[in-house]
Amino acid sequence: IHCSCRYLRDFEVETIGLKETSRRCCDPKCGAKLKDSVLDWEDELPRKEMNAAEKHCRKADLVLCLGTSLQITPACNLPLTTVRNKGKMVIVNLQKTPKDKKASLLIHGLVDKVMAEVLQLVKMPIAPYVRVDLFQLILNQTGCVSESKYIKWSLKVVSVHGEKAPLPFIESVEVTFPERPELKTAVLNQQPFLLKRETLKSRPIHMVLWVNFSEGCGCRFISIDCPIDFW
């Protein structure tokens, strides 16, 4: 039985068209695979959301069309419902739209800049955007067929949302071995962040991961101690 839980993501999911993603519902009673809610060109707009939009447009005194070409039906005709009910329509877009003649005000500019100035005029502060995200370390190890005293292992740095989910806030990962000078430092500059090594099974390894974050994050890097004792 699938529940009706929805999850808002601040990253680009890997699918479109209401397809299954690589993640599952967090509810232990459900656990079903999640589907994206990104519509493809041939997909119809969901009826529930369309009904709500039509209702609000009929009652609205003002409708704001922000950053849209107003060319895709039936959504592009929703603002006209407000105009027909003696409301006003304001369009903020860089290019012209087919509905420009119906608008009470046209602003050809960037939506972020325009709305920031509007909120400043009405003295409504814009709360800073703080993104909180998590990543995980996955260690896999397998025995070496040719030499039983060696072991092959790999370390992945991936998103908690799934291995296919991007990590835009991580710029690079440096892996050092402070107690094993014979092991070279690994610098992982591209996603997926993956390190593969083959070492002696009898000798545990103490790794230190330097995770370098992208510009704009609260801190530029963190270090993580990662001791490994092979089986």
Image (cartoon, rainbow, N blue to C red):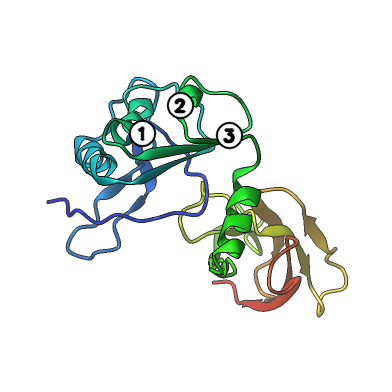
Query: Hey, which quadrant is residue 58 in on the image?
Result: top left
Residue 4, image x, y percentages: 19, 53
| Left or right: 6 as drawn, with respect to 179 | left
Residue assigned mark 3: 93
Q: For the residues marked 1 and 2, what is the alpha-carbon distance in whole angstroms? A: 9 Å
Work out whether 111 lies above or below 136: above
Residue 208, visible in the rendered structure: no
Residue in the image at 69% along x and 67% along y = 217
Q: Nearer the viewer, residue 74 or 141?
A: 74
Residue in the image at 35% along x and 56% along y = 7
Q: Residues within 10 Å of mark 2 (few under 14, many from 20)?
A: many
| Left or right: 173 as drawn, with respect to 129 | right
Kind of residue sitting beneath label 2: Leu
Residue 133, image x, y percentages: 53, 66
Q: For the residues marked 2 and 3, what is the alpha-carbon distance in whole angstroms? A: 10 Å
Residue 18, image x, y percentages: 32, 35
Contact between marks 1 and 2 (CB within 8 A): the answer is: yes
Which sits earlier in the primary sequence, circle 1 or circle 2? Answer: 2
For this orientation, the residue located farthest to the left is: 1
For this orientation, the residue located farthest to the front is: 86
Residue in the image at 58% along x and 34% along y = 93
Residue assigned mark 2: 70
Kind of residue sitting beneath label 1: Pro
Q: Which mark is residue 79?
A: 1
Q: Residues within 10 Å of mark 3 (few under 14, many from 20)?
A: some
Considering the numbered disc 1 on the image, is that residue within a helix, a strand or a loop? Answer: helix
